[in-house]
Image (cartoon, rainbow, N blue to C red):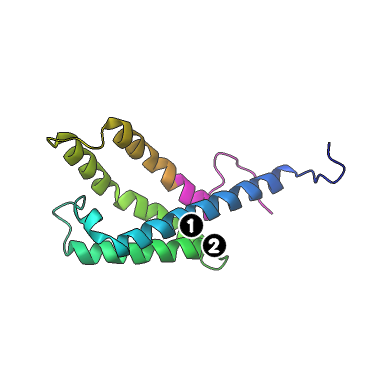
Amino acid sequence: MEPYAVKLNGNQKLATLRAALRWFLALIYCAAGILHILRPQWFMQITPAWVPYPLQVILLTGVCEVLGGLALLGQRFRKAAGFALALYAVCVYPANIKHAIDSLSAANVTLGWCYHAPRLAFQPVLVWWALFAGENINWPFNRRVE
């Protein structure tokens, strides 16, 4: 063992894991939000036809992603941001499904099941991740973080 190594207890390890996941998720959502704002045409293609005012919805979701990512980093709005980002991940799932169906049924398939299957399967993990990073849940660790 290193002479200056700090031994972390279970709660400290969980807090460190949560903080790392929080920062990474915030980075992902901020980057995605900026892409929604700068390149909305990319997202117009996968937006279901039943979504009203698709351009405005895409721009608004971009703003919400950036604000949610930033709010996740602060203590004051962290729980609300975690819940909102989890709910957002649930709400955009139909667009992900549409993207998979349209992509796989196109004449020139550019993104196959190797991309879409993991993306669709990862969505519940993204919901958990937002709730965990937002300190809304401790599952599957079930330890109290002090």
Q: What secondary structure predominates along the stretch shown in magenta?
A: loop
Residue occupying the point 44% across, 56% down: 83
Q: Which amino acid type is shown beneath numbered disc 2?
A: Leu
Query: Does 131 appear in magenta?
Result: yes
Tell me where residue 128 appears, x and y as whole percent: 46, 45
Height in image: 27 above or below 106?
A: below
Foreground of the two, 106 or 10 = 106
Tell me where residue 56 appears, x and y as whole percent: 22, 67
Q: Quadrant of the C terminus?
A: bottom right
Residue designated by label 1: 26
Q: Quadrant of the N terminus?
A: top right
Residue 41 in which image quadrant = bottom left
Tell me where residue 73 appears, x and y as whole percent: 54, 62
Q: Which mark is residue 76?
A: none
The answer to the question of whether label 2 and label 1 lie on touching residues, with beta carbons closer than 8 A, is yes
- Left or right of 84, for residue 51: left
Tell me where residue 102 appears, x and y as whole percent: 17, 41
Mark 1 neighbour class, 10 Å CA radius: few under 14, some 14 to 19, many 20 or more: many
Query: Does 75 appear in magenta?
Result: no
- Left or right of 29, for residue 78: right
Q: Which residues are magenta?
A: 128-146
Foreground of the two, 84 or 74 = 74
**C-alpha distance separating marks 2 and 1:** 7 Å
User: Is any atom of residue 104 visible in this view?
Assistant: yes
Q: Total marks drawn?
A: 2
Residue occupying the point 56% across, 66% down: 74
Q: Secondary structure at mark 1?
A: helix
Residue designated by label 2: 73
- Left or right of 13, for residue 75: left
